[in-house]
Amino acid sequence: MSLVMPEPDLTTLARRAEIVAALRAIVPGEGVIDDPDELVPYESDGLTAYRQPPLLAVLPGTTAEVSAILAWCHANQVRVVPRGSGTSLSGGALPLADAVLLGLGKFNKILDINYVDRIAVVQPGVTNLADTRAVEDAGFYYAPDPSSQIACSIGGNVAENSGGVHCLKYGLTTNNVLGCEFVMMDGEVVRIGGTQLDPAGLDLLGVVVGSEGLLGVVTEVTVRILPKPETARALLIGFSTVEGAGQCVADTIAAGIIPAGMEMMDRPAIHAAEAFVNVGYPLDVDALLIVELDGVGAECDHLLGEIERIALANGAVSVRMSVDEAERVAFWAGRKAAFPAVGRISPDYYCMDGTIPRRRLREVLERIRALSDLYGLGVANVFHAGDGNLHPLILYDANVPGELNRAEAFGSDILRLCVEVGGVLTGEHGVGVEKRDLMPEMFTDADLKQQQRLKCAFDPKSLLNPGKVFPQLHRCAELGRMHVHAGRVTHPDLPRF
Ligand SMILES: Cc1cc2nc3c(=O)[nH]c(=O)nc-3n(C[C@H](O)[C@H](O)[C@H](O)COP(=O)(O)OP(=O)(O)OC[C@H]3O[C@@H](n4cnc5c(N)ncnc54)[C@H](O)[C@@H]3O)c2cc1C
């Protein structure tokens, strides 16, 4: 494993018993876990290649407890790693040997639902799917739908700015969250955003969403809920070439049609998914598109016809339209289960997450195939084709010496390729530890320092989730230093703090 994490602080390790006692005074009973066996479930997240048991785990149940824990850790210079459901694929919730793991699992209540304002106020440990379940009887749903939605928490979704197959039309988490309660590292509790799309003041919510547990701990979230569309229908379109499928995606969007979802799978992913869910995916094609339209029935029918026409013009060899809701759900079942399906054909897989301009799709897939040959490791591609978000799944066996290192190198080359063609390092899984060391591929040193100054404004002691996102952790004092030459400061007219 090539990943290097910050050196554990030996003084903190030596103070473990004192830290356990102090946190037990805040969260009594079973709220503090220090038994090594009981800490094993926390040693990894969805990026299972990396493991590290935490110093201890604490499971608060109220905002006051979170505040008191953070305030104590702040005063005593102890690092903290927040954790929701632990499904992060970028190692965002990977523990540190000298850090307290702060689990938000007890924050599992839906606090308020207001159908008139179309909002729900939920605790961060509520799962993504539970949010929709809570409002679906009234005809509403929560739009962002990561494939991990049965397990991942809303707090984790906020921290990672998670997406899903329906984000092409409805946006990512950032477009569906209106406000949150947020506990700063020094224990201060603040409210960010509100209950409307455009609250007054600076857009701090835009900073908090996607902040990967580096700025503070989310203890309550206000989300938008949307009325369920009148109709939702899906098309399953098979192509004999990836090129044809990619062009169909580009032509559909160029025609002004924004489907609710537009997903692509390549041959290895189609075969793995079909073997897992048996929903009748065509097995004699090289690429499969699942395209969903939702809205008013007549409009959907018209647009589905348009997409079918575009698909046939691009060489589609099979087109199947869902006949009822059960079949529509079945079409998605294979896509949503694609990751575990691939887990059945390979001992281990490493899921990448980069974004590219749609028009470079064919070229990028060809180069990923060439890299696959170069590294001698298989790859299955599943992606949000509509927004160019790729998820190459690199197949490897962790028990074969050197294969994890080869998978990591292969993954890094894929992400470099995404940046090279004008894309970005991540689409929805976050940077975490996985893409941390690749950040300089995309950002200059000045860009990274500027981002870290923002982190310093929230967490000047760098105690929250260290070792994630930033390839090099500068001391905040160093980043904020001001050059004063011969007693002369620049712009002496400006007031200084
Ligand atoms: C099979 C599978 C499929 C997936 N599919 C998708 C997908 O389609 N789309 C997608 O976007 N992601 C997907 N993911 C990735 C993952 O589910 C998301 O990133 C999810 O949002 C993580 O939520 P979590 O509750 O598990 O967070 P965790 O893994 O526990 O934590 C993730 C990050 O959030 C921080 N964090 C968690 N809770 C809080 C909080 N309350 N306050 C502050 N910081 C917090 C942590 O410190 C960490 O940095 C998938 C994962 C798996 C395993």
Image (cartoon, rainbow, N blue to C red):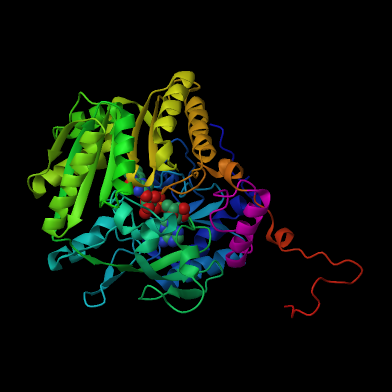
Along the horizontal axis of the image, is 277 left or right of 61? left
Residue 172: image location, x then y, percent: 36, 57
Task: Determine which quarter of the picture holds residue 299.
Answer: bottom left
Along the horizontal axis of the image, is 119 left or right of 136? right
Task: Determine which quarter of the picture holds residue 140.
Answer: bottom left
Taking the view exactly as shown, the residue that stands out farthest to the left is: 323
Q: Is 446 included in the stretch rendered in magenta?
A: yes
Q: Residue at position x 59%, y 41% from top?
A: 441
Q: Which residues are magenta?
A: 444-472
State whether residue 31 appears in this view.
Answer: no
Q: Residue at position x 29%, y 57% from top?
A: 127
- Against 124, is 356 above or below? above
**Residue closer to the observer: 453 or 311:** 311
Residue 339: image location, x then y, percent: 31, 37
State whether residue 440 appears in this view.
Answer: yes
Q: Is the C terminus in the top left, top right, bottom left or bottom right quadrant?
A: bottom right
Taking the view exactly as shown, the residue that stands out farthest to the right is: 486
Q: Residue at position x 54%, y 56% from top?
A: 17
Along the horizontal axis of the image, is 31 left or right of 268? right
Q: Is 271 included in the stretch rendered in magenta?
A: no
Residue 288: image location, x then y, percent: 25, 34
Q: Residue at position x 48%, y 75% from top?
A: 190
**Residue closer to the observer: 477 or 300:** 300
The number of numbered badges drawn on the structure is 0
Along the horizontal axis of the image, is 473 left or right of 311? right
- Against 182, is 330 above or below? above
